[in-house]
Image (cartoon, rainbow, N blue to C red):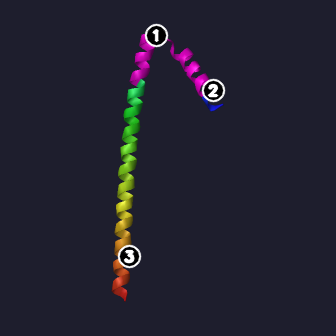
């Protein structure tokens, strides 16, 4: 079912884009740009995750140090 929907969508795109070399070249350029933007987002998300983990670890360490000095 999902595969059939995917194949149907590919056929629709083929009709929309055409079956020429220029259409394929345009689609390749669009994909390259999309991929570059997507990778930028992936790297930003990874960096944000790493910073969040570092902050959480810092907060935990400070909290444990504060609890240890209260005793």
The residue under the point 35% across, 57% down is 51
The answer to whether the residues at label 1 and label 2 have Cβ atoms under 8 Å apart is no
> Which residue does the numbered mark 3 point to in the structure image?
63
Percent coordinates x, y for residue 54 in the rendering: 34, 62
Spatial CA distance of label 1 from label 3 is 64 Å
The residue under the point 41% across, 37% down is 38
Q: Residues within 10 Å of mark 2 (few under 14, many from 20)?
A: few
Mark 1 or mark 3: whose residue is earlier in sequence = 1
In magenta, the rendered stretch is 6-29
Q: Is residue 18 left or right of residue 59?
A: right
Q: Count the numbered circles shown.
A: 3
| Residue 20, numbered label | 1
Mark 3 or mark 2: whose residue is earlier in sequence = 2
Residue 48 in the image: above or below residue 3: below
The residue under the point 38% across, 71% down is 60
Element type at marker 1?
A: loop
Is the N terminus in the top left, top right, bottom left or bottom right quadrant?
top right
Q: Quadrant of residue 21?
A: top left
Residue 45 in the image: above or below residue 40: below
Element type at marker 3?
A: helix
The answer to whether the residues at label 1 and label 3 have Cβ atoms under 8 Å apart is no
The residue under the point 37% across, 34% down is 36
Residue 12 sits inside the magenta stretch: yes
Spatial CA distance of label 1 from label 2 is 24 Å
| Residue 4, numbered label | 2
Percent coordinates x, y for residue 3 in the rendering: 60, 29
Residue 38 in the image: above or below residue 23: below
Spatial CA distance of label 3 from label 2 is 55 Å
Of circles 1 and 2, which is in front? 2
Q: Residues within 10 Å of mark 1 (few under 14, many from 20)?
A: few
């Amino acid at each position: 079912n999902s595969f059939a929907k995917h194949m149907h969508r590919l056929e629709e795109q083929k009709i929309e884009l055409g079956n020429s070399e220029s259409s394929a070249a345009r689609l390749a350029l669009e994909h390259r740009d999309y991929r570059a933007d997507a990778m930028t987002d992936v790297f930003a998300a990874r960096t944000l995750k790493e910073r969040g983990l570092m902050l959480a670890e810092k907060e935990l360490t400070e909290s444990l140090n504060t609890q240890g000095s209260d005793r």
